[in-house]
Amino acid sequence: MRPGVWRPPVEPSAAEQTVIRLVRRAKLFVFLRRYRHELFDEAFQTELAEVYRDSPKGQPPVPPAQLALALILQAYTGVSDDEVIEATVMDRRWQLVLDCLDTDRPPFAKGTLVGFRTRLINAGWDRRLIARTIEIAMVSGGFGPRALRAALDSSPLWGAGRVEDTPNMGHALRKALGVIAAGQGWGLDEGTAVLARRAGAPVLAGSSLKAALDADWDDPGERDHALAVVLAALEAVETFIAAQPAPVGAAVAVARQVRDQDVETTPAGVARLRRGVAKNLTELHIDRAYLPSALVRDRDENLQVFCKAWRVRNTTGRYDETAFTLNFDHGQLTCPAGVVMPFTPGRTVRFPAATCAACPLREQCTTSTRGRSVSIHPDETLLAELRERQATPAGRARLRERTAVEHTLAHVGHWQGRRARYHGQRKNLFYLRRTAVVHNLHVIARQRNDQQAA
């Protein structure tokens, strides 16, 4: 059966205040105790409860919010599952957060913790935990709606996950139907299934959209077909709820947002997952490992890329590529002696051998009897822009803005370490996302401290 809402006290007791005063360094314990009711409010706890089956049988599970807090603390302290259980009875800081101060019995078993983690992974809710910390940060006033600036480093980071967003779109639609079902006195799963069929979106009737789609997400054809099915369900549900009085607009808006961000239509009218970066992305701050990536290659024409250009190495002492002038409007390359040649990005320009042989600057340029050659990068326009920008103080200052993401990765690396903790990519992705939650909570804690100091 599904768990109820966990409602631990908001105000610290006298005993808890003593523990709070004694915490000197590990301040995340204190922050989570003070703000756990905001992070895991009733609405978010209801969402987390959806990873459990709605059944009248069985005993009420341990509150998901309590287990999620334990998983966050596990990432923060870097302990094993066995050590988590031990900490709940041996460490008063853990007890402070989990509302079990001075207990002599753990509030949950190791199997319960492992089972909850598995549920989170299977449902993709580890990503939702990250989104929840971002929601809290927005409420804290640390940032708000604005044009998106992305900063990336070539260390491992979780990305857009657009294939994963397709089932998330369906999840938002099921949630909208669930609100209507509850308002009409139905059980959540049964009512959602009935309403999904009535709306003409039977793919949403099951408990798992991925199972209903049964698609090979690595196959482009199957992926596009599954996406078309989900988009058709979105249209059907939008039409269905238009006549419903229940307040389900927010859930459907989430599905629309995923669609608008991650779906594009080809000239042939076929919907597919968008390649490249989101349209509302205005600046991309990256390191050079990303220059040949699709993020740059498929970028929108209005996207500004900030990155150090590849260094042009000059081991001969002769003219390097930067001594040649590129005219992109006319597609012309001019050598230091003033000889002009046409060029095409991604191709090599070869100056005539006779011209180079008679050139007074030949000794400073080339020793080849076949004349000088210059390779033009496929994205030479961008590289020229980057070189020009980094040659100015203002340009170098913009490049230093990416330092923030490097500091973030340093913090993530401190908690996570450089070695994978688990076997399997998905489990380690969960661990990385959980560590990202810890980092975000530190950012929120700093925001709160700054606001209090002001």
Image (cartoon, rainbow, N blue to C red):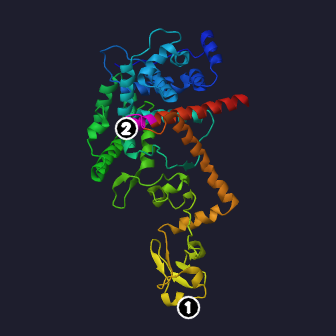
Residue 250 makes an appearance in the image: no
List the residue tagged with mark 2: 426
Circle on res. 358: 1
Front residue of this view, candidates 112 and 35: 112
The quadrant where residue 112 appears: top left
Quadrant including the C terminus? top right
Residue at 45% across, 40% down: 253
Give the percent coordinates (x, y) of residue 107.
Answer: 44, 14
Tally of marks: 2
Residue reaching furthest right?
Answer: 454
Residue at 35% across, 53% down: 271
Residue at 64% across, 22% down: 24
Looking at numbered disc 1 in the image, what kind of residue is underneath it? Ala
- The stretch of residues the image draws in magenta is 420-431
Looking at numbered disc 2 in the image, what kind of residue is underneath it? Arg
Circle on res. 400: none
Residue 178 makes an appearance in the image: yes
Label 1 crowd bin: few (<14), some (14–19), many (20+), radius 10 Å: few
Question: Is 122 above or below relative to 55?
Answer: below
Quadrant including the N terminus? top left
Give the percent coordinates (x, y) of residue 421.
Answer: 41, 34
Separation of disc 1 and disc 2 at Cα? Answer: 63 Å
Element under label 1? loop
Give the percent coordinates (x, y) of residue 175.
Answer: 39, 32
Give the percent coordinates (x, y) of residue 49.
Answer: 40, 24
N-term-proximal mark, 1 vs 2: 1
Question: Is 11 above or below relative to 259?
Answer: above
